[in-house]
Image (tube, helix red, strand yellow):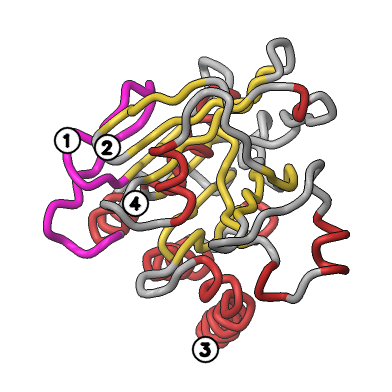
């Protein structure tokens, strides 16, 4: 780890570097992500870290706990990887690691993965999400041409969480449920035509509502839409990832049934 920085009261940045990134590469997508791996309490892995050997030689309860984070920035020249962490008080395995990290600390991760980058040929772009989607939305905005037509909405807790990111319309949650302000803003915004490329990510509940709006009301084809729940209220990442496929299948079935009515 090279350095850390507190961006807002609830957003903490960690910049990774060093020889471990010699073979790392990113940049094809703006939603690239890595899976950070943390040993359970009391478990120490031999160096160098070898996930295949760990899974072969150790019982499952000693395997690493994984947490997924979007690549906010990758600099291929300095070979530095920037990750932003949403802080929820003193909870969250990865967030608490990030807050306590110091230069020289090490962390193991896999990746990168990713699927989305804004199509430069699209007539316009819709970007919408909560704090968890902000790194990917910011990266997408940086990739777009200066004259691109963009509607970008990000919901945060309050004004203190707003960052200096050109092009973002900030929505302050306050005491409202997560996603309520975002759904309201997106559905009320001017619809700039059917030639849209959309990116909608964040808490699964509001993602479901916006998926319905985009797929049923606006008839956006799935190939023009990157949409997924990064997290779900009441679930940690392990619980959400275990149930996410079934959740998505149910949502797709419900909305497909509505389309046919």
User: Which of 258/126 is in front?
Assistant: 126
Please give left or right for residue 26 compared with residue 16 in the image.
Answer: right
Task: Look at the picture and state if 136 lies above or below 183.
Answer: above
On the image, the x and y values in percent for residue 26 come to 74, 31
Mark 1 nearby-residue class (10 Å; few <14, some 14–19, many ≥20)? few
User: Which of 214/202 is in front?
Assistant: 202
Q: Earlier in the sequence, mark 2 or mark 4?
A: 2
Specify the farthest residue to the top. 77
**Residue 227 in view:** yes
Write the start and end of the magenta stretch as one range. Answer: 155-178
Nearer to us: label 1 or label 4: 1
Residue indicated by mark 2: 170
User: Which of 89/209 is in front?
Assistant: 89
Q: Earlier in the sequence, mark 2 or mark 3?
A: 2
Mark number for residue 261? 3
Q: Secondary structure at mark 3?
A: loop
Q: Earlier in the sequence, mark 1 or mark 4?
A: 1
């Amino acid at each position: 780890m090279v350095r850390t920085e507190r961006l807002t009261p609830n957003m903490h940045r960690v910049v990774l570097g060093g020889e471990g990134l010699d073979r790392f590469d990113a940049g094809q997508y703006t939603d690239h992500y890595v899976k950070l791996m943390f040993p359970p309490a009391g478990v120490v892995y031999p160096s160098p870290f070898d996930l295949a050997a760990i899974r072969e030689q150790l019982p499952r309860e000693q395997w690493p706990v994984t947490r997924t984070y979007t690549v906010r920035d990758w600099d291929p020249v300095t070979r530095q990887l920037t990750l932003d962490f949403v802080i929820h008080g003193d909870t969250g395995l990865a967030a608490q690691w990030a807050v306590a990290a110091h230069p020289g600390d090490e962390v193991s991760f896999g990746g990168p993965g990713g699927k989305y980058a804004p199509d430069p040929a699209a007539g316009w772009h819709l970007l919408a999400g909560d704090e968890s989607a902000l790194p990917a939305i910011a990266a997408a905005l940086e990739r777009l041409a200066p004259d691109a037509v963009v509607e970008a909405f990000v919901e945060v807790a309050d004004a203190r969480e707003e960052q200096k990111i050109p092009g973002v319309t900030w929505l302050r949650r306050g005491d409202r449920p997560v996603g309520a302000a975002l759904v309201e803003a997106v559905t009320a915004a001017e619809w700039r035509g059917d030639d849209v490329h959309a990116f909608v990510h964040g808490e699964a509940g509001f993602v479901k509502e916006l998926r319905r709006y985009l797929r049923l009301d606006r008839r956006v084809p799935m190939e023009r839409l990157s949409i997924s729940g990064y997290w779900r209220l009441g679930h940690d990442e392990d619980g959400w990832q275990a149930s996410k496929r079934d959740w998505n299948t149910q949502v797709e079935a419900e909305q497909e049934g509505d389309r046919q009515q």
